Amino acid sequence: MKKAGAPFVFIGCIELLEDVGLRAQSERELIERLEEVPAGSIFYHTYGYFLRHRYFVGPYANDFATWAVVHLRDQMLGERLAVVDPFEFDTLEQLREELISVIDDHLSHLSAVPRADYGEPFYFVQSHVVEVPTGHEAWGLEEFRGCLADVDASAIYYHLVEARARLGRRSGDFAAWLRESLSRPDLAEHVERIDLYLSSLERVRARVLNLLVEAIEQAEEAYQEPT
Amino acid sequence: MIKIEDYRDVAPQGTVDLLLKLAEKVRGRRFLHVSMTRYGGGVAEILQRLVPIMVDLGIEAGWEIIGGDAEFFSVTKAIHAALEGEDQIITDEMLQHYLEMNRLTALKLNLDADLVLVHDSPPASLVEHRPPEGTWVWRCHVDLSSPHRRIWNFFRRYVTRYDAAVFSLPKFSQKLGIPKFIIHPSIDPLSDKNRDLSRREVQTLLASLGVPQDKPLLLQVGPFDRYRDPIGIINAYRMVKKHHDVRLVLVGGGSAAGSENTDVHEVVRDTATHDPDIVLLDLPPDAHLQINALQRAATVVLQKSARDGFAIGIAEAMWKGKPVIGWASGGIPAQIIYDVTGYTVTSVEGAAFRLRHLLNNPELVARIGGAGREHVRRNFLITRHLSDYLALLVHLTGRST
């Protein structure tokens, strides 16, 4: 089995939450606050969902959509926000613009602004990610598969979500390593194409593991063929 | 001696390894907790477990207790209630006494540490006497959203001298000019209150409490006061009782002060004497195993809490695989994922409806109970609490080794 030029070092993470000190009581206030909150808060309420809900997801996969449905009783806005897939945006600013645009458009069709009179305000939070080396590192596919099966789910979040959304590594760390260090662009492409949205870290782990198992089996078969 | 390795089988996969690695980053740093008391109450309960685990992880963790006379303890009790929004009579002389006692305490304690976490209001003014080195953080465990204005104005002066504050939820906080972090409380899965019990242990403990197990049990744990509204719970039970032969167990924790609460207690006691299927238990604060057994024996756990801070009892019940019906207030909505781990309701009728819904669908009880236990495993165990505190240590003390 081929050895990589450089090992893949698995990094886990802990998310430390900070109250931004801003809240919204209505859809109009939600727009106003979305314009001013730090990008880290946009990140937390959209991508951050995956770290908090590793196994099962609630009705909507971002906090804005859930708030609109549960506390504003505005199912239409909830649905429109829910389909905003954060992984389709290159930057958090683009994602911020899209969210504002969706709410603005929704409000333009309403005669009264929905308020959380019977629910709770939306509290804006941002997260600080503390990186934690897991001690796992892999030089080849088999080793990579073993490590991936063992590591804390936060490592999957770090390498697939944090790396893409906040650290500017758009391919995600798994695909980048497979492509650059292991010269497996085919496998990298499959990993890169995994749809993270509306999934969970454990499901993503399972899907990457399946791809790795297939690739390992194919490599073993190819190795045996000449004899 | 509690060890981190003891948690490997109960915490989520990879958690203990991650904690060991995180601890390596902060090994040798001193993390000091300061609180009012070493026994009694939720803060002491969790620190009794957290501090030894931190030490086991190689962190120089300490826990100091403040001292004071009887008047100091009575003033701190009044301040605590005022910060939660209750009207209290607190004179300037009382506040001066509070400051003076903490000044004397500061002379006695070694407050040198990389991170000093000061829990709740009693020791908060120690910050006046902080040494030049070290980061100081105020850990507020109460719901500070609507405090008594005069007392909060007095208190705010001290809180803003900290480097940061920690609240259990954003909605419990106040505007401050310092960073405010959010850390949820937690439960210890290995403590007497939450550890696994065999069927025989549960049976023995329930028998000792005089609670038969011949019909489904509905349970609420909490003082018999107007905030926990045991009368409302009894009314919900009565709506259900017409359709299901169930038993209601109300567990109070000592007597709540105040004439209104005395009235509540009397009505509850009077009602219970006329219905053999309502069981009232007045248990001491250290009846952890008994509470554990009752939660494990329950079919559904109810939690009405008009004002109870985070209400971590919800997580305790979910950890035992029980569906929980909680009122949508305080920290309850943050713990219950609607229709996944339980139900939040806003009325007695809503509670009765969900009780019947669950009792008529036993497979739902099993599904919701299982999801609740997993939800707690991921989000409300002491191991998550520990990782949050270590992350705070890394984040605020900067350097990592």
Image (cartoon, coloured by chain):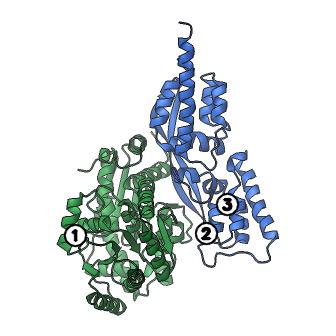
Chain colours: A blue, B green
* Number of residue marks: 3
Q: What is the secondary structure assignment of the residue under circle 2? A: helix
**Residue in the picture at 51% in, 83% down:** B149
The residue under label 1 is B206
**Mark earlier in primary sequence (2, 3):** 3
Q: Please state which of residues B256 and B348 is positioned toward the viewer in this rendering.
A: B348
The reply to whether dot 2 and dot 3 touch (C-beta < 8 Å) is: no
Q: CA distance from mark 3 to mark 1?
A: 52 Å
The residue under label 3 is A37
User: Crowdedness of circle 1 by 10 Å Cα count: few (<14), some, many (20+)?
Assistant: some
Amino acid carrying mark 2 in the image: Val
Q: What is the secondary structure assignment of the residue under circle 1? A: helix
Amino acid carrying mark 3 in the image: Val
Chain ID at mark 1: B
The residue under label 2 is A70
Chain ID at mark 2: A
Q: Nearer the viewer, mark 3 or mark 1?
A: 1
**Figure check: A165 above or below B261:** above
- Could you tell me residue A117's position as x and y percent? 63, 79
Q: Please state which of residues B313 and B258 is positioned toward the viewer in this rendering.
A: B313
- Could you tell me residue B169's position as x and y percent? 50, 66
Q: CA distance from mark 2 to mark 3?
A: 22 Å
- Could you tell me residue B158's position as x and y percent? 46, 71
**Figure check: A79 above or below B248:** above
Q: Viewed as shown, does residue A33 lie left or right of B248? A: right
The reply to whether dot 2 and dot 1 touch (C-beta < 8 Å) is: no
User: Crowdedness of circle 2 by 10 Å Cα count: few (<14), some, many (20+)?
Assistant: some
**Residue in the picture at 30% in, 56% down:** B49
Chain ID at mark 3: A
